[in-house]
Image (cartoon, rainbow, N blue to C red):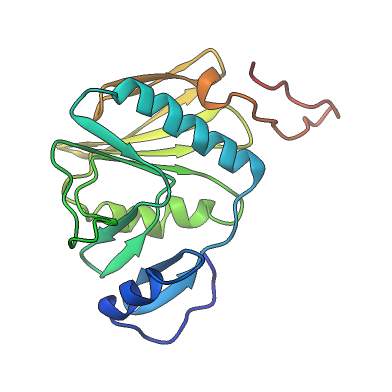
């Protein structure tokens, strides 16, 4: 997300502007922020996630959406674009345009150097205000490592899944995702010894 805010806008003004725009912007408490572009690896991981989760959810009660689905957060009044979002049962939208989801059960963000701090901090704080949300997942693009936050009675509980042989379990939507599928064709950064980490097949 860009660090330079635009002039104050009402939620209605933001939506009217955003729906006509050529590029995506997020909105928080009166300010509109242009989103930066994503790397090849970020895009590859996102495409893999949408494909693998979509295949597993086919014909069932849950449905995934890609990063073009906007999500509404009630307070502070915000609109954001997760990399992947899923809903189970009837999807609830803000209006009849059907482009702003209000009841996600799962949100996934692929981390990058420019957004990681925000995704872990302020953005996660916003997501926790969504009553329907049950799982929040952070996917590294630098190594096969995924952090999964699950909403429990005692609060949000973190677990880690690491390695291409591992399997990520998403209880909210009933999926089991091999990390080798999530990271298919992904090139990891060069190791300290000068050798590139292997790609998944």
For the view shown, which residue lies furthest in the bottom direction? 7
In this rendering, position of residue 148 left or right of residue 144 = left
Residue at figure coordinates x 49%, y 15% from the top left: 166
Q: Nearer the viewer, residue 146 or 110?
A: 110
Residue 83 location, x and y as percent? 44, 46
| Location of residue 75 in the rendering, given as x and y in whole percent from the top left corner | 22, 67
Compared to residue 118, the image places residue 30 above or below, namely below
Give the residue at x 39% y 60%: 122
Q: Position of residue 183 (x, y in %)?
A: 57, 26
Q: Left or right? Give the position of 191 relative to 107.
A: right
Q: Residue at x 63, y 39 (%)?
A: 41
x and y, in percent, of residue 153 in the image: 14, 37
Quadrant of the snapshot with the C terminus: top right
- Asked which quadrant contains residue 197, the reply is top right
List the single residue furthest toward the right. Answer: 194
Q: Nearer the viewer, residue 116 or 49?
A: 49
Closer-to-camera residue (146/65): 65
């Amino acid at each position: 997300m860009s660090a330079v805010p635009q002039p104050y806008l009402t939620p209605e003004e933001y939506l009217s502007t955003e729906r006509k725009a050529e590029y995506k912007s997020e909105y928080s408490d009166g300010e509109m922020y242009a989103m930066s572009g994503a790397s090849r690896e970020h895009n590859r991981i996102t495409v893999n996630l949408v494909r693998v989760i979509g295949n597993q959810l086919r014909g069932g009660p849950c449905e995934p959406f890609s990063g073009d689905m906007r999500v509404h957060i009630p307070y502070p009044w915000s609109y954001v674009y997760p990399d992947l979002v899923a809903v189970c049962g009837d999807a609830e939208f803000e209006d009849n345009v059907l482009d702003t989801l209000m009841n996600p059960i799962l949100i996934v963000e692929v981390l990058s150097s420019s957004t990681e701090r925000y995704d872990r901090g302020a953005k996660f704080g916003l997501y926790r205000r969504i009553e329907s949300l049950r799982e929040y997942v952070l996917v590294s693009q630098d190594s096969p490592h995924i952090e999964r936050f699950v909403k429990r009675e005692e609060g949000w509980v973190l677990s880690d899944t690491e390695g291409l042989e591992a399997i990520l379990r998403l209880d909210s939507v009933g999926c089991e995702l091999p990390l080798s599928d999530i990271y298919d064709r992904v090139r990891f950064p060069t190791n300290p010894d000068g050798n590139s980490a292997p790609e998944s097949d």
